[in-house]
Amino acid sequence: MNATTPTLTLGPVLYLWDSEKWRDFYFRVADEAPVSDVVIGETICSKRLHFTEPYLVSVINGFHHGQEGAAWVARARNIEHRASA
């Protein structure tokens, strides 16, 4: 039987953190966390992207020095709720 090494993937931050706290969290993950892959992006509300956008390149580049992989995700579709007539 062939045993494989388990991997751990960290999903995107779902909370609305201030920009510097978000950036510092991912820098710390890149330096210290035992994860194989990291998903970065905005999956809750596309209007929040402007908070993290200035730091995206530096955060993603932070994962290139280690063994982690970084993936960018974005909302696939906006859902609009309307009242029924």
Image (spheres, rainbow, N blue to C red):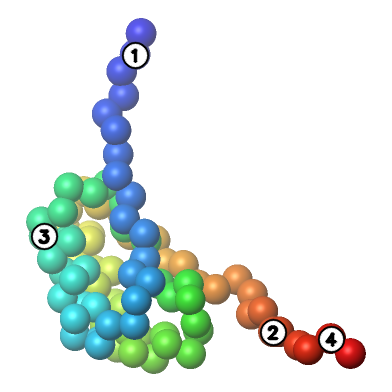
What's the residue at 48%, 72% (across, down)? Answer: 43
The local secondary structure at tag 3 comes to helix
Circle nearer the N terminus (1, 3): 1
Q: Nearer the viewer, residue 18 or 64?
A: 18
Query: What whole-number distance in Å separates the C-alpha atoms at marks 4 and 2?
Result: 12 Å
Place residue 49 in its image quadrant.
bottom left
Residue at image mark 4: 84
Q: Are marks 1 and 4 in contact (CB under 8 Å)?
A: no
Residue at image mark 1: 2
Circle nearer the N terminus (3, 4): 3
Query: What whole-number distance in Å separates the C-alpha atoms at marks 1 and 3?
Result: 30 Å
The local secondary structure at tag 4 comes to loop
Q: Residues within 10 Å of mark 4 (few under 14, many from 20)?
A: few
85 relative to 29, above or below: below
Expressed as whole percent of the image width and height from the top left, the position of residue 64 reads: 22, 60
45 relative to 28, above or below: below
Query: What whole-number distance in Å separates the C-alpha atoms at marks 1 and 4?
Result: 56 Å
Q: Nearer the viewer, residue 34 or 72?
A: 34
Dot 4 amino acid type: Ser
Looking at the rendered image, the quarter that the N terminus falls into is top left
Query: What whole-number distance in Å separates the C-alpha atoms at marks 3 and 4?
Result: 50 Å
Residue at image mark 2: 80
The mark closer to the camera, 1 or 4, is 4
Expressed as whole percent of the image width and height from the top left, the position of residue 73 reads: 46, 67
What's the residue at 31%, 24% (across, down)? Answer: 4
Q: Are marks 1 and 2 in contact (CB under 8 Å)?
A: no
Circle nearer the N terminus (1, 4): 1
Residue at image mark 3: 31
